[in-house]
Amino acid sequence: MRIVLVIGWLLTFASAAGAQDRVLGLLTLPEVFGNGACDRFSPRDVSLHATPGGAAVGVVHVAKNWTLDVNGGCDGLEVAVRLRGVAEERPLPTQEYEYEAPAAIVLEQRGRWFKLRLATGSAWMLASNQDVFRPLEELYKDALTYLTPDWGRQLSDVPGARRRAARIPPGMKEPSVRIVGSQRSGGRLWFQVEVMSHSGCADRTEPKAIDRGWVTAHSPSGQPLIWFFSRGC
């Protein structure tokens, strides 16, 4: 199955995504993605705005719906953004929250208004009753989580405290972790993690916790320092 996501270049009236933008979670858009691969749904446009409640600058729409194979399966869903006066299109950044289930990347939230990351810059949309916001805390719950290469290989014993070198399995670039808890401190989101001896996907023996501490949710660029395998092992 293949999903092609394209989006128009963002004009100057739409807000630019800067280093201060932090990924808060993912927003489902069944209006354009349906409710799973091969879903026979009726697409509806999603309006984009320069600011919450501000001028409309374009729409997210389905440029091409699923092509269903006579032998089963499907292919070719194309989701695009149509911006006023712009012809060129570019891919829309997305992440899967479940197997074959893409969602938009949220940078900011104000009530039911969500700021979405685009290929260039960002824009706001008003979520419908169908759309579901999945914050990082929910995405990581019961998931196979790991620390990304942006992580500085350090942990804090309490949120905001002096960091120390973490105990990490030799040669592991993306250590597997178990989420123990989360809290906000100093205006930032922190996660308490257990660093595991190995990935349960690579070795079927039961992983053991070899270190425990707190890590801030985001790198200086706003990228998550923890992520998860949406498709499992």
Image (spheres, rainbow, N blue to C red):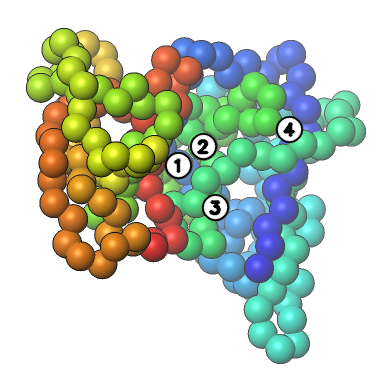
Give neighbour class at mark 3: few <14, some 14-19, many 20+ (Cα, 10 Å): many
Q: CA distance from mark 1 to mark 4?
A: 20 Å
Q: CA distance from mark 3 to mark 1?
A: 9 Å
Decide if residue 39 is in sight here. Answer: yes
Q: Find out whether the residues at labels 3 and 2 contact each other: C-beta distance under 8 Å.
A: no
Q: Amino acid at mark 2?
A: Ile
Tell me: 187 left or right of 55: left
Query: Label 3, on which residue?
Result: 102
Numbered marks: total:
4
Tell me: 131 left or right of 31: left
Query: Label 2, on which residue?
Result: 105
Q: Which numbered disc, 3 or 4, marks the residue that appears first in the sequence?
A: 4
Q: Amino acid at mark 3?
A: Pro
Q: Find out whether the residues at labels 1 and 2 contact each other: C-beta distance under 8 Å.
A: yes
Q: Amino acid at mark 1?
A: Leu
Q: CA distance from mark 2 to mark 4?
A: 18 Å
| Res. 13 image quadrant | top right
Tell me: 124 left or right of 210: right
Give neighbour class at mark 4: few <14, some 14-19, many 20+ (Cα, 10 Å): many
Q: CA distance from mark 3 to mark 2?
A: 10 Å
Q: CA distance from mark 3 to mark 4?
A: 21 Å
Q: Amino acid at mark 4?
A: Gly
Mark identifier at residue 26: 1
